[in-house]
Amino acid sequence: MIWGGEFGRTPASDGNANGGGGNFGRDHNPYGFSIWMAGGGIKGGKLIGATDEIGLRAIQDPVPGARFPVDRCAWQDRQP
């Protein structure tokens, strides 16, 4: 099972600066987000990558979307 979305969330709202519609909630973040995987040979408890201290940008081992299918096979100890 793979769960994720096309965007993460920013650490804070930027109000109306980017069409956020006020000071409520957080805005879309294409620079750092999470994906959960389970079953299919995925090793439990594995963490890949990290964001900066405020959770805005990926700074360690980022995985571009186009690489995800290939890297997923490696995380499962499979050949792509």
Image: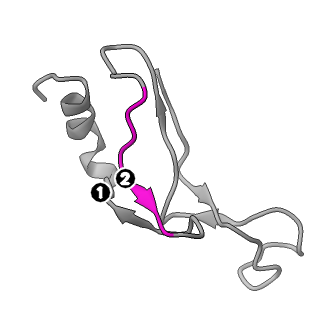
Name the residue type under label 1. Answer: Asp
- Residue 78 located left or right of residue 58: left
Label 2 element class: loop
Q: Position of residue 78 (x, y in %)?
A: 15, 22
Q: How many marks?
A: 2
- Residue 31 located left or right of residue 19: left
Residue 49: mark in rendering: 2
Q: Earlier in the sequence, mark 2 or mark 1?
A: 2
Q: What residue range appears in magenta?
A: 45-52
**What's the image's color scheme?**
one colour
Vertical side of 71 occupied by 25: above or below: below
Q: Which residue is mark 1?
A: 61
Q: Position of residue 1 (x, y in %)?
A: 46, 20
Image point (58%, 55%), residue name: 8
Q: Please tell me which residue lies in front, 71 or 65.
A: 71
Q: Residues within 10 Å of mark 2 (few under 14, many from 20)?
A: few
Residue 26: mark in rendering: none
Is there a contact, CB below 8 Å, between mark 2 and mark 1? yes
